[in-house]
Amino acid sequence: MYSFASSSKWKTLQIYRINFINRNTMAEKERFIKADASQQEAIAKQFFTTTRTVRSALNFETNSPFAKTLRAYALNHGCKMYEVTLIDNPYEKVITL
């Protein structure tokens, strides 16, 4: 989980992510759906579940049909999905003279 200590707005924002490796490019990717605590509580209330279940779905920790439904609902109600790719250094084999 990221921490944003500089702004009080970001203190309540919870960002969840997952690491996975794309076998074709061997690049590490992080996917997460950003939702603040009030959005997570609203989703949990709508589906009669816990906020922990919602966080697991938004973190891509679970991949059940219910988790997919929670992610779709979150994206359709104002949450944003982010995908960050960490690639290998393309200049690793450059020789400096």
Image: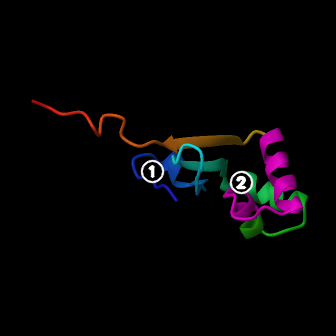
Q: Residue at x 89, y 57 (%)?
A: 46
Compared to 9, does 91 lie above or below? above
Of residue 13 and residue 86, the one placed in the foreground of this image is: 86
Q: Marks 2 and 1: which is nearer the front?
A: 1
Circle 1 — which element?
loop
Cα distance in 3D space between marks 2 and 1: 18 Å
State the SS at label 2: helix
The one nearer the camera, 82 or 25, is: 25
Q: Residue at x 56, y 48 (%)?
A: 29
The main secondary structure of the magenta stretch is: helix
Residue 17, quarter of picture: bottom right
Q: Residue furthest left?
A: 97
Q: How is the image coloured?
A: rainbow
Which numbered dot is residue 37?
A: none
Q: In the image, is 73 to the left or to the right of 16?
A: right
Q: Quadrant of residue 53?
A: bottom right
Q: Which residue is mark 2?
A: 38
Tell me, yes or no, whether the highlighted magenta stretch contains residue 32: no
Residue 3, x across and y down, in percent: 46, 55
Image coordinates of residue 96 in percent, x first then y, are 14, 32
Which span is picked out in magenta?
54-76
Does the magenta portion include 64?
Answer: yes
Can you say whether 91 is above or below 71 in the image?
above
Marks 2 and 1, the one that precedes in the sequence: 1
Query: Residue type at mark 1?
Result: Phe
Quadrant location of the C terminus in the rendered image: top left
Going 60% across and 42% down the picture, which residue do you hit? 83
Q: Residues within 10 Å of mark 1 (few under 14, many from 20)?
A: few
Tell me which residue sits at (39%, 47%) in the image: 6
Identify residue for label 1. 4
